[in-house]
Image (cartoon, rainbow, N blue to C red):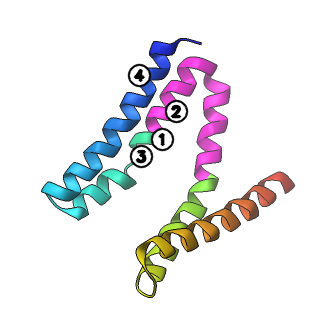
Amino acid sequence: MDYLYTLLKFIVAGCIIVGVTLIVQHIDPRYGGILAAAPITTTIAFLFTYAESGTNVAHQLVLGSFYFAIPSLIFLASLYLLAERFSFLSSICGAYLVWIGGVLVMNRAMSMT
């Protein structure tokens, strides 16, 4: 395994997270939300996967990402609704429980096809 290449992946992902937090703190949370929701990280993951494993594996990753985006949307909706009633950390925990349930259901549904 090429350690510099792996380090590059960590740096790229870290830059996105730092970028989101800086935008939220210094510009506007709405713009941070745009960056956080943008398909930047998935695109980077697709490119690295394509470069390392080829078209077929990258295509499977794209398809899996499509289906598993549904539980992510449910996570965001749950977090929004729970945050109105509970502390933010409790809301995140609850939303992750909902997300895990959604992932399990989606995984089961995908394995049936």
- State if disc 1 and disc 4 touch (CB < 8 Å): no
- State if disc 1 and disc 2 touch (CB < 8 Å): yes
Residue 92 pos. (x, y %) = 49, 69
Classify mark 1: residues with Cα within 10 Å, few (<14), some (14-19) or many (20+).
few
Identify the secondary structure beneath mark 2: helix
Q: Name the side, left or right, on which 70 lies relative to 41.
A: right
Judging by the rendered image, the residue that carries numbered circle 3 is 39
Judging by the rendered image, the residue that carries numbered circle 4 is 8
Q: Which mark is residue 42?
A: 1
Judging by the rendered image, the residue that carries numbered circle 2 is 46
33 is within the stretch colored magenta: no
Residue 78 pos. (x, y %) = 52, 76
Circle nearer the N terminus (3, 2): 3
Question: Toward which corner of the image does residue 44 lie, by quadrant?
Answer: top left
Q: Amino acid at mark 4?
A: Leu
Q: Name the side, left or right, on which 91 lies relative to 26.
A: right
Question: Toward which corner of the image does residue 74 lie, by quadrant?
Answer: bottom right
Gap between marks 3 and 2 measured at Cα: 10 Å
Q: Amino acid at mark 3?
A: Pro
Q: Residue at x 28, y 50 (%)?
A: 20
* Magenta-tinted stretch: 43-66
Q: Which of the pair 1/58 is nearer the observer?
A: 1
Gap between marks 2 and 1 measured at Cα: 6 Å
